[in-house]
């Protein structure tokens, strides 16, 4: 497998279809991000050639603190490797290390209409939230995202529901460009995992567990929460007064969420987990059991994270090596695009 990326870089044959995934380094990833997304990505590495990109250029569309930001970006990349994303056979890198993202984004800006960007619901939401900073980058954010994806002949993009509109726009831009200049871009598709468990908030189990939750940290299990904090948060999780352990999202959202988490942590189906725990004797025991299972799943990953983090030289090397490989890969499409639109070759 190591072969293919190397051979692609050398102009050889790509053996597997490409997956591109971009993520922002805001907040510490949560148990919801791990179970709902990253765990699936780890599995996808078998059948696809993957690029996992920390999209730091997207993040500056919102005001931020540079020192914290630097730490967060490095933390996210290190954490992803600890969780099982493989920087040898695949590519895990920072967007800002590959200038081709910005170059292609500029070109695609000239093939995207104001009207299209004005319809993006994320733009509307973010402009409302950040009324004092509705900058042009926020407006063209989806064009940079399209560039991320199109740069690498991406076939599949694993995304949540909130990113569907951006992917649809990316497909429109690519199709428009191809109509004018021939088959330059691969048209990407979204990838929604077959069993994408959605993990809900521990205190308000009808809402999604969100890593950007700031109001009440008891809602969220952060992947780097120490074991005693994890146990405590599960003990405080909201349940109900039915006193039965069942997969019943409508009537028992809290219990169902805990059951789902337990099932994921122990690699069972929710039904199997319900059968196993049916007679555990009260919600107190139930919550302890779920907490223990999550600690058992996360402890080795956290240990690996702290080991990697301490090995600064190793992470530095991964950062630089992965950026080089991404840079080389990106040149193929970028050169095709530049030729197509009539830029004079260097
Ligand atoms: N906009 C995405 C988000 O907020 C992040 C992102 C940037 C992305 N570029 C991407 C996701 C390319 C998938 C593919 O979640």
Image (cartoon, rainbow, N blue to C red):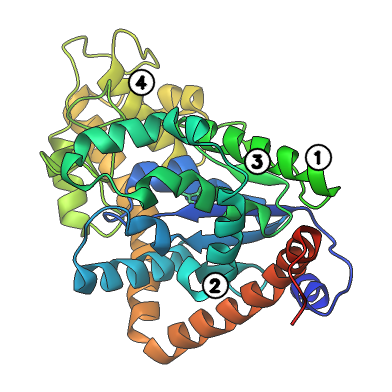
**Residue 330 location, quadrant:** bottom right
Quadrant of the rendering where the C terminus is positioned: bottom right
Depth check: 34 or 97 in front? 97
Task: Please say if the residues under marks 4 and 1 sit with CB atoms less than 8 Å apart.
Answer: no
Give the label, 4 or 1, closer to the camera.
Answer: 1
Q: How many marks?
A: 4
Q: Rounded to the nearest whole Å, what is the CA distance between mark 2 and mark 1?
A: 26 Å
Q: Is residue 209 above or below residue 278?
A: below
| Label 2 secondary element | loop
Q: Which residue is mark 2?
A: 99
| Label 4 secondary element | loop
Mark positioned earlier in the residue sequence (2 or 1): 2
Among all residues in the image, which is located at the extreme bottom?
313
Q: Position of residue 266 (x, y in %)?
A: 45, 42
The answer to whether 112 appears left or right of 29 in the picture is right
Q: Position of residue 192 (x, y in %)?
A: 59, 34
Q: Rounded to the nearest whole Å, what is the CA distance between mark 3 and mark 2?
A: 20 Å
- Mark 2 Cα-neighbour bin, 10 Å: few <14, some 14–19, many ≥20: few
Report if the beta carbon of the residue with label 4 is closer than 8 angstroms to ligand 1: no
Q: Which residue is mark 1?
A: 179
Residue at 42% across / 91% down in the picture?
313
Q: Which residue is mark 4?
A: 278
Q: Which mark is residue 322?
A: none
Task: Please say if the residues under marks 3 and 2 sit with CB atoms less than 8 Å apart.
Answer: no
Q: Rounded to the nearest whole Å, what is the CA distance between mark 4 and mark 1?
A: 58 Å
Q: Rounded to the nearest whole Å, what is the CA distance between mark 3 and mark 4?
A: 52 Å
Q: Position of residue 163 (x, y in %)?
A: 49, 36
Give the label, 3 or 4, closer to the camera.
Answer: 3
Mark positioned earlier in the residue sequence (4 or 1): 1
């Amino acid at each position: 497998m190591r072969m293919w990326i190397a051979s692609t870089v050398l102009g050889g044959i790509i053996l597997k279809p490409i997956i591109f995934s971009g993520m922002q380094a805001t907040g510490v990833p949560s148990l919801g991000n791990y179970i709902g997304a990253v765990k699936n990505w780890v599995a996808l590495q078998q059948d696809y050639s993957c690029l996992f990109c920390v999209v730091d250029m997207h993040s500056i569309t919102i005001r931020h603190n540079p020192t914290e930001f630097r730490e967060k970006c490095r933390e996210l990349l290190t954490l992803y490797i600890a969780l099982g994303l493989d920087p040898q056979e695949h590519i895990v890198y920072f967007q800002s290390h590959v200038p081709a993202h910005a170059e292609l984004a500029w070109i695609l800006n000239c093939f995207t209409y104001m009207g299209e960007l004005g319809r993006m619901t994320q733009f509307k939401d973010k402009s409302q939230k950040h009324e004092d900073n509705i900058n042009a980058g926020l407006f063209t954010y989806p064009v940079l995202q399209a560039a991320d994806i199109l740069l690498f002949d991406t076939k599949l993009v694993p995304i949540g529901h909130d990113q569907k509109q951006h992917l649809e726009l990316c497909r429109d831009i690519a199709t428009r460009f191809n109509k004018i200049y021939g088959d330059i871009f691969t048209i990407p598709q979204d990838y929604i995992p077959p069993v994408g468990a959605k993990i809900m908030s521990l205190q308000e189990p009808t809402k999604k567990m969100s890593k950007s939750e700031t109001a009440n940290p008891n809602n969220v299990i952060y992947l780097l929460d120490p074991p005693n904090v994890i146990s405590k948060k599960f003990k405080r999780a909201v349940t109900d007064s039915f006193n039965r352990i069942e997969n019943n999202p409508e009537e028992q959202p809290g219990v169902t969420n805990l059951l789902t988490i337990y099932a994921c942590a122990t690699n069972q189906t929710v039904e199997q987990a319900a059968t196993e725990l049916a007679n555990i004797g009260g919600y107190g025991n139930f919550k302890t059991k779920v907490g223990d299972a999550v600690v058992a799943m996360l402890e080795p990953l956290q240990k690996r994270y702290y080991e990697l983090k301490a090995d600064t030289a190793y992470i530095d090397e991964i950062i630089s090596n992965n950026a080089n490989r991404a840079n080389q890969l990106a040149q193929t499409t970028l050169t095709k695009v530049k030729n197509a639109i009539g830029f004079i070759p260097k």
